[in-house]
Image (cartoon, rainbow, N blue to C red):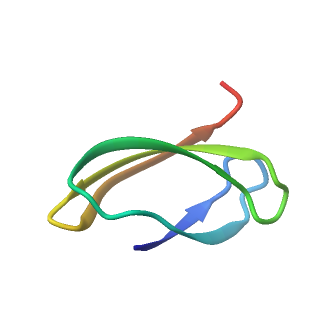
Amino acid sequence: MLIDITCFTCYENFSEDIEIYDGVHQEIIDCEVCCRPNKLFIEQKNGEVIQLNISDGNE
């Protein structure tokens, strides 16, 4: 599933392909522009993203 992400550090937008499965999970994705890590908290249900929170991946 392709999702749009706004980098927590540089605020640039980029897209990332994530796996589809129900439940809550976290991923660390490096920004395609500034290469800084972004921590994604993703909640999915029935193959749809119902919540996406992005924070600093250096925590």
User: How many discs mark residues in the rendered view?
Assistant: 0
* Residue that sits furthest to the top in the current view: 59
Judge whether 56 appears above or below 37 on screen: above
Tell me which residue sits at (66%, 36%) in the image. 57
Q: Quadrant of the N terminus?
A: bottom left
Identity of the residue drawn at 82% across and 54% down: 35
Classify residue 5 as left or right of residue 52: right
> On screen, 41 above or below 44?
above
Q: Position of residue 45 (x, y in %)?
A: 17, 58
Residue positioned most to the right: 34
Residue at the extreme left: 46
Question: Which of the two residues, 18 or 41, is positioned nearer the viewer here?
Answer: 18
Q: Quadrant of residue 31?
A: bottom right
**x and y percentages locating residue 47 in the rendered image:** 22, 68
Nearer-the-camera pick, 22 or 38: 22
Q: Position of residue 34 (x, y in %)?
A: 85, 56
Quarter of the image for the C terminus: give it. Answer: top right
Q: Residue at x 25, y 67 (%)?
A: 48
Left or right relative to 38: residue 34: right
Residue visible at 82% across and 64% down in the picture: 33
